[in-house]
Image: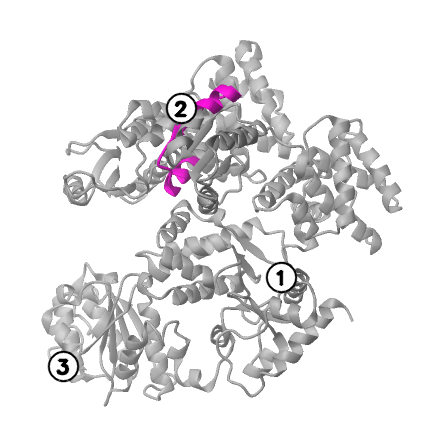
Amino acid sequence: MKRSERIYLYIKERSGTFKGQKLSGQIGFDAQEIADELDILRNNVSKELNELHRQDKIVKFTGRPVRYFDREMLAELLETELGQGPLQFRDVEECKRLFVRNAEEEANPFARLIGADKSLKRQVEQGKAAILYPPDGLHTLIVGQTGVGKTLFAHMMFAYGKAMHRFAEDAPFITFNCADYYNNPQLLISHVFGHIKGAFTGADTAKAGLVEEADGGVLFLDEIHRLPPEGQEMIFYFMDTGTFNRLGETTRSRRAKVLIIGATTEDPKSALTKTFVRRIPNIITIKPLSERTLEEKLDILKLLFMEEAQRVKKPVRISVEAVKALIGSIGSGNVGQLKSNIKLLCAQAFLNGIDNPSFIEADFRMLPPGVRDGLLTLSANRQALAELTQYVSEPLLVSPPGGKFKLDDEGSREGFNLYQVVENKVALLKGEGISDDLIKQIVATDVNVYVKDLYNKKHSVNMTTRERLLKIVDEALVDFSEQISLYVQKRLNRSYRDRFLYAFSLHLSAFLKRVKAHEAIPYTEIEGAIPQDSDYMRMAEEIGVLIEQHYHVTVPRAEIEYIALLLESAEDDELEEKIIILVATHGKNTASSMVEVAKRLFSSTDTNIIAIDMPLEVNPQEVLEQTAAMLKGMECQKGVLILADMGSLCNIGALLAEQLKIPVRTLDMVSTPLILEAMRKVDIAGMDLESIYESLLNFKGYEAVDTHEGPANTQEAIVTICSSGHGAAMKIKALVEDVLRHAGRIIEVIPVGVLHLDDRLEEIAREYRIVAAVGMKKPAMNVPFIPLEQLIDGEGERLLTELVFNSETALEARIPQGDGKGNMVVQRLCEESLQRFLTYLNPAKIMSVLLEFDKSLEKDLQLKLSNPLRVRLLVHCGCALERVVTRSPLVYKEDKSLVDKKKLMALQKAAQIFDETLKLRFDEDEYYFMANML
């Protein structure tokens, strides 16, 4: 019997012993228990358990330790159908909540409400009492912040009423938002109570109101605080007597049996009349999501992901960091905002994984910056972080309820399939009627980007390439691939390192699998994509011979084309050398622990940060020698930043600088926030060592601490101004936020309109210190003002950064001079324009190349382009690249002899970057159009 069969049989037999027992909590058997019982190594047991779970034979209960239970037996014991997964739950109760619909739930719809037996227990009891109270129930007001679920709660009250036979099965539930007619009280009252003919101008016929439509059921008045006083008076008279009159009638002779449920985000005592509040005996306050238990937050998050999984008809796997960030970002938006964040995340994940038929992967990096900050927010609360880690110790797996979907494990062979990449792209392009020659060109470019992106994505996991490959393909194949990788590097004298090893191993595995299964390989679409006389093709031919000798198979000529394409795509980019961060502290593991925490919070596995632990009994000279030896093996010519705690470790910088002949700066009093800030500056801002050192000298952490007496409004804000405060102001807000994010500052950006501008600024100034105003009109208030045209021109971005940091030296350190990458306004405007114009090229992917083109052009011409001109030029370049792909060039019909030859030569030289990175080359006439722009 195979090892996996023994393990599955053990779980199946032990699961059967639960018959007759009441299931609750975590059930099942952990890897250590199984290993001890069956005398199998624990790591082998874990491997087989993961495979059995992937095959949907067993169910996983997360926690510490992780437990496994037979899937069929669990379904039998719960007397329900379990949707196909793989499935994982926190406990039996979560499983029941998702899949079990029993008689109790049918009689009590509140049982499906997350938190009904915990944080919302009192509210549920109030809701039930309001429905059951004789003779016709209690009129109710539901109070809570936007997005907490007031409407959902009202619907559950109505469903409970039908279950308790307080309402007929066909009873109406009428919803009305009182804000719809807020500015017209007469029309609002007419809508609620109806009107007679001639009641007001335009009332040509009599019309029944919502009260009559809701007769026998519920009238749900959302935003009830928007009802005018006269409307409230008519409502509470109706609640008292059950009678009402239509607008225009003089006597209240009409009757209706209606339960009124109102909802408001405001304090009833201040937003509603006292008389009205007294008429509503039952006020239910729904807690904000931030005050709910962590377990409930997770359940809500899973439910929202399940809804998205149902929409995309694929399981969703969410990384641990993404879950933590989403939980940590919960704020005033409550469930509504969380739902929007999850929708955006799943939409991004769906686009990224559109070629994966099995599942979509939601990763931390896909989250918007504001949501990603939730990880830091959560990390500040150690208790919450520790509790969440108990619940979510591995990626969260959510499957559509009842859907028949199969989720391949991360180690599945479908992780990379060059054939599939080509097939998918060819099918798509052929469907658009594109010619075969153009398809080859597009496919070659697409594979180039895909292979680079594939390796960069996989390499972000804290695992060596070999370790990851061994989870996917067998060791002998990895060994052979490593030999090929070394052979290629030596023969071509180029840097391939791990990227080619990763792509080639997976591709070779797929090729051998197809040969064994006698499957046809779609060769014709790729033929001719790589020149036959290129180094890549000659090298691919040699690799083909080696494969034939090693595996005793025939490698067709067209397979050589695939290998050549891999060789071209997988060549390593020039890696930008970074400043080394060296964290040095006293103690056995202090520095290592701080670096590990910082890496996890920063979601980075970069090797440009190292830890030096100095136990108290170790001689400082030994530490110096150890550190010097480590740095000698690293590229550190840009310098080393030492973050030390105290004493001798603060003095090794000068010795290292002299010994290694490299720049070194040292900061003492190291802390985790200081390490995070240093990593961010090194990784994002692109600053040199001296600039980073200067900027960190006064770093006080991420939470502002008031060290002197002063005004209470220490929180800073930047105001963006347009005519309405909604349209252009929101656009300016996005531009300003990009500038702030690039500069490494988090400051509130508040959009306002010109109407009552000064009054609005006075209100904002009571809560914030206004750093600057940006937009269309200069305010009367004495605050720095940056006109919109100045922001777009580039000078405004510099001024804004200067105002934010309030230091010219810090400003110069933070803004790379003459570097297009430093201009976030240009980058954003270009990307947004190209999104509208491009069909085949991805603006986000080509933006970095366009900025390199701009940098090279300015350097050759020795001029600095204005931002408007830069935007026009880069957008034209992006469109020109698309025209190369679609083979629809522009024709320059003017006199070419009048065009400046120096500009033409500079443009052609700068455009070489497109040929080198994207394998796309401009038509000659494009240069003449661009030269005329300059």
Q: Where residue 823 sits: x, y (%)?
A: 41, 28
Q: Marks 2/3: CA distance? A: 81 Å
Q: In which quarter of the image is the N terminus?
A: bottom right
Taking 904 as reference, is 779 above or below it? below
Does 700 sit left or right of 780 as displayed? right
Q: Mark 3 and 1 residues: CB-CB less than 8 Å, in contact? A: no
Dot 3 or dot 1: first in sequence order is 3
Dot 2 or dot 1: first in sequence order is 1
Q: Magenta segment range?
A: 654-679
Give the residue type that dot 2 points to. Answer: Glu
Residue shown at 55% from the left, 50% from the top:
351
Q: Marks 2/1: CA distance? A: 49 Å
Give the residue type that dot 1 points to. Answer: Leu
Residue shown at 35% from the left, 26% from the top:
694
Dot 2 or dot 3: first in sequence order is 3
- Dot 1, how many residues are within 10 Å of its Cα: few (below 14), some (14-19), or many (20+)? many
Which residue carries the number 2 mark?
Answer: 690
Which residue carries the number 1 mark?
Answer: 407
Q: Mark 2 and 3 residues: CB-CB less than 8 Å, in contact? A: no
Give the residue type that dot 3 points to. Answer: Arg
